[in-house]
Protein backbone atom coordinates (compact mmCIF):
# COMPACT_ATOMS: atom_id res chain seq x y z
CA UNK A 1 0.00 0.00 0.00
CA UNK A 2 2.83 2.40 0.86
CA UNK A 3 4.51 1.59 -2.46
CA UNK A 4 1.33 2.54 -4.31
CA UNK A 5 1.23 5.88 -2.50
CA UNK A 6 4.85 6.58 -3.49
CA UNK A 7 4.22 5.64 -7.12
CA UNK A 8 1.05 7.77 -7.16
CA UNK A 9 2.89 10.75 -5.68
CA UNK A 10 5.73 10.41 -8.20
CA UNK A 11 3.28 10.10 -11.07
CA UNK A 12 1.43 13.22 -9.97
CA UNK A 13 4.72 15.11 -9.64
CA UNK A 14 5.88 14.10 -13.13
CA UNK A 15 2.51 14.94 -14.66
CA UNK A 16 2.57 18.31 -12.93
CA UNK A 17 6.04 19.03 -14.30
CA UNK A 18 4.97 18.03 -17.82
CA UNK A 19 1.84 20.18 -17.62
CA UNK A 20 3.86 23.17 -16.40
CA UNK A 21 6.39 22.82 -19.22
CA UNK A 22 3.63 22.38 -21.79
CA UNK A 23 1.87 25.49 -20.49
CA UNK A 24 5.11 27.50 -20.84
CA UNK A 25 5.60 26.31 -24.41
CA UNK A 26 2.00 26.96 -25.47
CA UNK A 27 2.11 30.39 -23.81
CA UNK A 28 5.19 31.21 -25.84
CA UNK A 29 3.38 30.39 -29.07
CA UNK A 30 0.29 32.35 -28.04
CA UNK A 31 2.26 35.45 -26.96
CA UNK A 32 4.37 35.41 -30.12
CA UNK A 33 2.67 38.39 -31.78
CA UNK A 34 2.79 40.59 -28.67
CA UNK A 35 6.43 39.75 -28.00
CA UNK A 36 7.34 40.30 -31.64
CA UNK A 37 5.73 43.75 -31.54
CA UNK A 38 7.66 44.51 -28.34
CA UNK A 39 10.95 43.67 -30.07
CA UNK A 40 10.03 45.85 -33.07
CA UNK A 41 9.25 48.80 -30.78
CA UNK A 42 12.54 48.29 -28.94
CA UNK A 43 14.41 48.27 -32.24
CA UNK A 44 12.92 51.62 -33.20
CA UNK A 45 13.74 53.14 -29.81
CA UNK A 46 17.29 51.79 -29.83
CA UNK A 47 17.95 53.09 -33.33
CA UNK A 48 16.80 56.56 -32.26
CA UNK A 49 18.96 56.39 -29.13
CA UNK A 50 22.02 55.26 -31.08
CA UNK A 51 21.55 58.05 -33.64
CA UNK A 52 21.37 60.57 -30.81
CA UNK A 53 24.37 59.08 -29.00
CA UNK A 54 26.45 59.25 -32.17
CA UNK A 55 26.26 63.02 -32.02
CA UNK A 56 27.62 63.31 -28.45
CA UNK A 57 30.79 62.66 -26.52
CA UNK A 58 30.17 59.76 -24.17
CA UNK A 59 31.94 58.09 -21.25
CA UNK A 60 33.60 54.68 -21.53
CA UNK A 61 30.86 53.05 -19.42
CA UNK A 62 28.23 54.57 -21.69
CA UNK A 63 30.19 53.39 -24.72
CA UNK A 64 30.19 49.83 -23.36
CA UNK A 65 26.43 50.04 -22.81
CA UNK A 66 25.94 51.31 -26.36
CA UNK A 67 27.96 48.38 -27.68
CA UNK A 68 25.57 46.03 -25.87
CA UNK A 69 22.67 47.85 -27.50
CA UNK A 70 24.28 47.48 -30.91
CA UNK A 71 24.79 43.73 -30.37
CA UNK A 72 21.17 43.42 -29.32
CA UNK A 73 20.12 45.41 -32.37
CA UNK A 74 21.87 43.02 -34.75
CA UNK A 75 20.34 39.93 -33.13
CA UNK A 76 16.88 41.49 -32.94
CA UNK A 77 16.96 42.52 -36.59
CA UNK A 78 17.83 38.92 -37.51
CA UNK A 79 14.75 37.71 -35.63
CA UNK A 80 12.54 40.33 -37.28
CA UNK A 81 13.81 39.37 -40.74
CA UNK A 82 13.21 35.68 -40.02
CA UNK A 83 9.68 36.44 -38.80
CA UNK A 84 8.85 38.38 -41.93
CA UNK A 85 9.50 35.25 -43.98
CA UNK A 86 7.32 32.78 -42.08
CA UNK A 87 4.94 33.31 -39.17
CA UNK A 88 2.06 30.86 -39.60
CA UNK A 89 3.84 27.60 -38.81
CA UNK A 90 3.38 26.75 -35.08
CA UNK A 91 6.79 25.05 -34.89
CA UNK A 92 8.42 28.15 -36.35
CA UNK A 93 6.53 30.34 -33.89
CA UNK A 94 7.70 28.14 -31.03
CA UNK A 95 11.36 28.40 -32.09
CA UNK A 96 11.09 32.13 -32.69
CA UNK A 97 9.24 32.56 -29.40
CA UNK A 98 12.28 31.19 -27.61
CA UNK A 99 14.60 33.56 -29.48
CA UNK A 100 12.31 36.50 -28.77
CA UNK A 101 12.12 35.61 -25.07
CA UNK A 102 15.93 35.65 -24.89
CA UNK A 103 15.95 39.02 -26.66
CA UNK A 104 13.39 40.41 -24.23
CA UNK A 105 15.50 39.25 -21.30
CA UNK A 106 18.59 40.85 -22.83
CA UNK A 107 16.94 44.18 -23.52
CA UNK A 108 15.40 44.27 -20.05
CA UNK A 109 18.86 43.67 -18.60
CA UNK A 110 20.27 46.46 -20.77
CA UNK A 111 17.54 48.80 -19.51
CA UNK A 112 18.33 47.89 -15.88
CA UNK A 113 22.02 48.65 -16.31
CA UNK A 114 21.24 52.01 -17.88
CA UNK A 115 20.14 53.26 -14.46
CA UNK A 116 23.71 53.03 -13.21
CA UNK A 117 25.36 54.92 -16.06
CA UNK A 118 26.66 58.41 -15.57
Image (cartoon, rainbow, N blue to C red):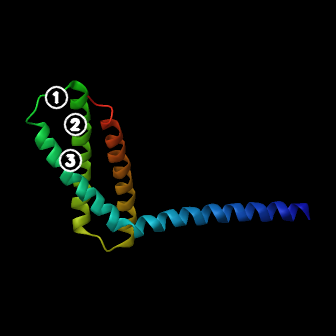
Q: Position of residue 95 (x, y in %)?
A: 38, 61
Quadrant location, the N terminus: bottom right
Q: Name the residue under label 3.
A: 46
Q: Where is residue 98 in the image (x, y as percent from the top left)?
A: 40, 57
Taking 88 as reference, is 27 left or right?
A: right
Of marks 1 and 3, which one's residue comes earlier in the chain? Answer: 3
Q: Residue 66 carries which label?
A: 2
Q: Is mark 3 on a helix, strand or loop?
A: helix
Q: Where is residue 38 in the image (x, y as percent from the top left)?
A: 29, 59
Of marks 1 and 2, which one's residue comes earlier in the chain? Answer: 1
| Closer to us: 118 or 39 | 118
Q: Residue 109 carries which label?
A: none
Residue extending farthest bottom: 88
Q: What element carries label 1?
A: loop
- Rounded to the nearest angstrom, the CA distance separating label 1 from label 2 is 10 Å
Taking 57 as reference, is 11 left or right?
A: right
Q: Name the residue under label 1.
A: 58
| Closer to us: 17 or 110 | 110
Amino acid sequence: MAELAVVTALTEKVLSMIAEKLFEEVSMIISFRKDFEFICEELFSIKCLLNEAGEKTISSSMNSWIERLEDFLVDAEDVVEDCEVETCNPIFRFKMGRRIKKLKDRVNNIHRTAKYLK
